[in-house]
Image (cartoon, helix red, strand yellow):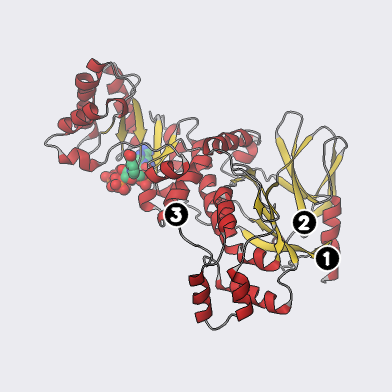
Amino acid sequence: MKDKNLALLCDYYELTMSNGYFLSGYGDKTTYFDMFFRSIPDGGGFAVAAGLEQLAEYIEDLHFTEENIAFLRSKKLFSEEFLAYLKSFRFTGDIYAIPEGTPVFPNEPLVTVRAPAIEAQLIETYVLLELNHQSLIATKASRMVRAAMGRPILEFGSRRAHGADAAILGARAAYIGGCSGTACTIADQNYGVPASGTMAHSWVQMFDSEYDAFKTYCALYPGNATLLVDTYNTLKSGVPNAIRAFREVLVPRGVTGFNIRIDSGDIAYLSKKARAMLDEAGFKDCKIVATGSLDEYLIRDLLLQGAAVDIFGVGERLITSKSDPVFDGVYKLAAVEERGAVVPKIKISDNTAKITNPHFKKVYRLFDKSGKAFADQLCVYDEVIDGTGPITLFDPDAPWKKKVITDFTARELLVPVFKGGVKVYESPAIGDIRDYCARQTGLLWDEVKRFDNPHTYYVDLSTKLWTVKQQLLEAHK
Ligand SMILES: Nc1ncnc2c1ncn2[C@@H]1O[C@H](COP(=O)(O)OP(=O)(O)OP(=O)(O)O)[C@@H](O)[C@H]1O
Ligand SMILES: O=P(O)(O)OC[C@H]1O[C@H](OP(=O)(O)OP(=O)(O)O)[C@H](O)[C@@H]1O
Ligand SMILES: O=C(O)c1cccnc1
């Protein structure tokens, strides 16, 4: 993907509008665009931001090749002046973003772009596709990881992913969301997501007997043997043959740390029976991996049934976020600059939830004295919340419902990623993003993290921002 020029991976209207801005004298106008989302997949209480590293790489490299320009010329729609401008196009603006792995909520900017109109417009599609996809999968992974109550989850979805990028970057996002590894080897090579795996039924079928298959695998990979026990009959042959192979090949070598995998049938019943057989054979440390169309609800249900599963492998329902496969991030103009002053802009809708929050904004996360996050506050860019004075929180839709908070700390969420076209943000190592995600998720109340009817986390507006919004609504009445 890195070697491909993806400048034309944009919706065609970005180009027609940009050509139009260019010809109408708006091309250089400084604009502020926010990327934010409106609803949390699966009715969850929070989402996990992901995709920033790839977005930053894309923008840093964004340029139009001779071929791109010749292609655009062939459409007979774009002016020669605009095509000449594209030849030397580079992103020159500023970008602020919420770091990957941060729990995020509807209506707060995950990315704010301050750039000349054409530049900000041309990156819209990529900003959205990268953040929408990776945030979707990171959010889904986080749900599954919570359902597994500390048991590792391995991402096994490449074969069911909607294309190569969805597999590779999906594996990256799943790791950020808390998965422990992936079967996707290239995700390890490219992004450092630890790759591992077990074996397919074909391995077991290939040999004259199940026992031969297990014995050979144990001899080849003594430190990494996870034997798939359900090819013929899990309890009658799979588990007994696995026990025999462990006993005959691994025990004499002093190897520990082997596993079995169950991929079909009643996982609760079979895992409990298999556990008893392994324990009886003296293999109390042998772990049981379960796979087969799992998701957070099945994982939770299996654990409620007392399934003796130590590790879950999850594919299709994670890599496609099958139960709710759309992350509805949007990219909206929030302000422009007129003679150096920031002028807020609003998008009005009959659906009040779709009215945008205008202005160049900051996002603060507020923590109570126990360290738990209790609300996010959107402010105008020149406001500061430092926790030294009280803060008034109110419901933006019912501003008379107020409370004054005194004992709290505040952390600004948006960090600079580009300044004047120069990338100033060094993306952390993937393992650090994953750890950060786990720590930040740990700062949310359990009520926000439950699956059913989670508590709505407040994303409030400062009085100043709320007033600007009301004034714009009045002005457009
Ligand atoms: N104890 C259980 N409680 C709830 N769901 C389960 C339990 N055990 C398995 N499942 C789930 O039920 C579904 C069973 O799928 P299905 O019957 O189509 O195939 P399978 O058992 O995996 O067998 P095969 O791979 O041979 O088709 C899977 O989604 C699996 O995760
Ligand atoms: O079910 P998922 O969550 O996607 O997990 C990955 C699945 O992929 C493999 O099966 P494969 O695609 O070979 O087909 P199978 O279901 O017939 O085993 C593996 O054996 C798992 O069952
Ligand atoms: O390694 C595995 O067990 C695996 C990999 C991909 C898909 N299903 C299982």
Q: Are marks 2 and 3 in contact (CB under 8 Å)?
A: no
Comes first in the chain, label 3 or label 1: 3
Q: Is residue 341 visible?
A: yes
* Marks 3 and 1, how far apart at CA: 41 Å
Q: Position of residue 330 (x, y in %)?
A: 63, 60
| Three-letter code for the amino acid on which mark 2 is drawn | Phe
Badge nearest the viewer, 2 or 1: 2
- On screen, residue 356 above or below 49: below
Amino acid under disc 3:
Asp
* Location of mark 2 (residue): 360
> The N terminus appears in which quarter of the rendering?
bottom left
Reading the chain from its start, which is encountered first: label 2 or label 1?
2
Mark 3 = which residue? 165
Dot 2 or dot 3, earlier in sequence? 3
Q: Quadrant of the C terminus?
A: bottom right
- Name the element at disc 3: helix
